[in-house]
Image (tube, rainbow, N blue to C red):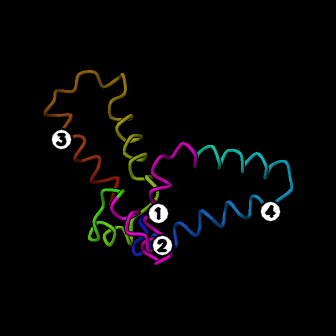
C-alpha cells in the first residue's frame, strides 16, 4: 500500500508521539517495546538528519549553519517535504528477490533471470 501526500512533519510527529506514549506507559511490556524502539531509532543514522530537515521545513530553526552543514541546499530541503521515513518497499523487494534466487533455481541464465525479475516485480506491484 502506498501512502502519498503525507508531510514529513506528520511522519516525524507520529514517531515522536509513539515514543512519548511509550514513555508514559508503566507496564513491563511497554518498557520492553520502548527499549526496542530506542535501539532501532539509535541505529538509524539518518533519523537525526530527518529531524533537522523537518525542523527547517516547519520553521523551528532559523540557523543557516544547520542548512549549510548538511550539504543540502534549499531545493533539497523543499524536495524532502513529502519524504517517506520508512523503507518497506526495499524490504519487500529483498523478500521478493530471495524467493527468485532460492537454491532450487540454480539454472537461471542472466537473461531469463532478468526477465523473471521484471515479470515478478510487475505482478507484485499491480
Q: Position of residue 59 (x, y in %)?
A: 46, 78
Viewer-side label of 1, 2? 2
- Along the polypeptide, which appears first: circle 4 or circle 2? 4
Give the magenta-colored segment's residue range: 41-68
Viewer-side label of 3, 2? 2
Secondary element at tag 2: loop
Q: Magenta part mainly helix, strand or loop? A: helix
Dot 3 crowding, Cα within 10 Å, few <14, some 14–19, many 20+:
few
Viewer-side label of 4, 3? 4
- Along the polypeptide, which appears first: circle 3 or circle 2? 2
- Front residue (pair 6, 1): 6
Secondary element at tag 4: helix
> Tags 4 and 3 in contact by the CB under 8 Å rule?
no
Secondary element at tag 1: helix
- Front residue (pair 5, 75): 75
- Along the polypeptide, which appears first: circle 1 or circle 3? 1
Q: Is residue 116 left or right of residue 56?
A: left
Q: Position of residue 16 (x, y in %)?
A: 62, 64
Identity of the residue furthest to the bottom in this view? 59
Q: Which mark is residue 52?
A: 1
Gap between marks 4 and 2 measured at Cα: 27 Å
Q: Residue at x 50, y 75 (%)?
A: 60
Q: Tell me if residue 6 can be seen.
A: no
Q: Position of residue 39 (x, y in %)?
A: 63, 43
Gap between marks 4 and 3 measured at Cα: 51 Å
In the picture of the structure, the residue carrying the numbered disc 3 is 115
In the picture of the structure, the residue carrying the numbered disc 4 is 24
In the picture of the structure, the residue carrying the numbered disc 2 is 61
Q: Is residue 126 magenta?
A: no
Amino acid at each position: 500500500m502506498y501512502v502519498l501526500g503525507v508531510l514529513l512533519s506528520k511522519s516525524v510527529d507520529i514517531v515522536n508521539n509513539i515514543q512519548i506514549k511509550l514513555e508514559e506507559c508503566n507496564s513491563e511490556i511497554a518498557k520492553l517495546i520502548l527499549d526496542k524502539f530506542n535501539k532501532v531509532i539509535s541505529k538509524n543514522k539518518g533519523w537525526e538528519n530527518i529531524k533537522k530537515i523537518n525542523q527547517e521545513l516547519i520553521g523551528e530553526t532559523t540557523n543557516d549553519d544547520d542548512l549549510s552543514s548538511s550539504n543540502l541546499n534549499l531545493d533539497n530541503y523543499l524536495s524532502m517535504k513529502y519524504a517517506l521515513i520508512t523503507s518497506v518497499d526495499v524490504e519487500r523487494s529483498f523478500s521478493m528477490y530471495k524467493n527468485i534466487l532460492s537454491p532450487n533455481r540454480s539454472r537461471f541464465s542472466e537473461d531469463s533471470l532478468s526477465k523473471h525479475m521484471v515479470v515478478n516485480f510487475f505482478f507484485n506491484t499491480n
